[in-house]
Image (tube, grey):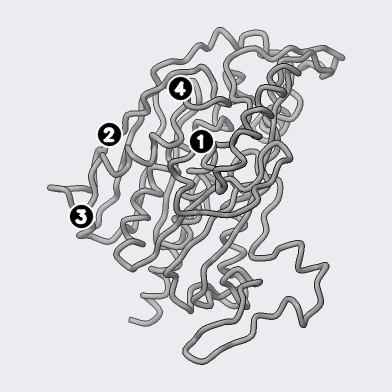
Amino acid sequence: MPGNTIGRLFRVTTFGESHGEALGGIIDGCPSGLSLTEEDMQKALDKRRPGQGPTATARRESDTVHILSGVFEGRTTGTPIAFLVYNENQRSSDYEALREVFRPGHADWGFLKKFGLRDHRGGGRSSARETIGRVAAGAVADRLLEEAGIRVQAATVEFGGIPVRTVDMQGAWERLFFSADPDVIPLWEERVLRARKEKDTLGGIVQVEATGVPAGLGEPVFYKLDAALAGALMGVGAVKGVEIGDGFAAARACGSQNNDPLLPGGQFASNHAGGILGGISSGQTIVARAAVKPIPSIPREQQTVDMHDRPATILVGGRHDLSAIPRCVPVHRAMVSLVLADMLLLQRRLLS
């Protein structure tokens, strides 16, 4: 499968670069008859749009989406859905000094080794702006999931080394930082001010939950639901670790602590497994968390090498987020929605 496509039945291909003419995607395999408008996509894109919040880049983009095909009179037709978002506020000249050097912590080195050339303007295809296609497609997946009674939510549960004390997924979508805990927001704001003063960047942890997922989604061997979710979340830029349910804490527990006792009526006494057993959904809430590294573009001089393998120093200019959080939170939510939509269609085909 091409590296720009995700899914088996609900297939999404994204295209575009940070400083190119436009970005977008094509969704193939979406069932017909779903209610869908540009506004549905736009609401999702507005949550990840640049220029919002205390950690955001100064780049201003409207990220206005245009549906080109696959929708007629507000309903999906069952044919490929193509959509486009034009770049409007590129300042490619900001990156001219990076043409001959590699940015530490970025994809520059690997991109050159793989393709033999690279777009130095904001990272090109490896830029976070590529996620526009994922978020827009995720909005379509959400329409399919909603009709099946499935709801996906996402929130920040740790930022700058400061974890939340409580988790309220319901209200997180409207809070600053998409915080799962309103009481921790002032601490996070102070942490942002300190990092900005120190000319540094911050990372954090994003939690995604899916409720209403029926038991039986996923495969027992090579397309496990937890493996697919982990792969999708690891495919988001800056993510360096993923856990399902208790995750790494399970490694420090005993079996008597980690097992989820079954109760009559398809219920469980706990959910340490995060809603997935043997690679298959159990009917409980699916819980996934992703560790997001700090943005590598820091306003400090760093050691690197140039295209000729000569030692060099670099001071990354341009406009950058102080953290991938909170703008990556809608991306994580979209990736989980895309996987669940694909799994739902696969299960329906199996049972048909």
Q: Residues within 10 Å of mark 3 (few under 14, many from 20)?
A: some
Residue at the spot x=71%, y=34% of the render?
110
**Label located before the other in sequence (4 or 1):** 4
Instruction: Tell me the CA gap for discs 2 and 1.
Output: 28 Å
Q: 10 Å neighbourhood of mark 2: few (<14), some, or many (≥20)? A: some
Left or right, residue 53 beside residue 77: right
- Whether 21 is drawn above or below 229: the answer is above
Q: CB atoms at circles 3 and 1 under 8 Å apart?
A: no
Q: Amino acid at mark 3?
A: Thr
Given residues 115 and 23, the one toward you in this image is: 23
Observer-side mark, 3 or 1, equals: 1
Which residue corresponds to the image point at 84% horizontal and 18% vertical from the top-left? 303
Gap between marks 2 and 4 measured at Cα: 17 Å
* Image quarter hosting the C terminus: bottom left
- Label 4 CA crowd tier, 10 Å (few <14, some 14–19, many 20+): some
Mark 1, residue position: 176
The residue that mark 4 highlights is 20
Report the amino acid beneath label 2. Answer: His
Q: Of all residues shown, which one is farthest toward the left?
A: 73
Element type where label 2 sits in the image = strand
Residue 280 picture location, percent across and down? 55, 75
| Mark 2–mark 4 CB contact (< 8 Å) | no
What residue sits 66% from the left and 27% below the top?
190
Q: Which residue is mark 2?
A: 66
Q: Which comes sooner in the sequence, label 3 or label 1?
A: 3
- Above or below for 240 versus 220: above
- Of tags 4 and 1, the one toward the viewer is 1
Q: Amino acid at mark 1?
A: Leu
The x, y position of residue 341, in whole percent, is 41, 61
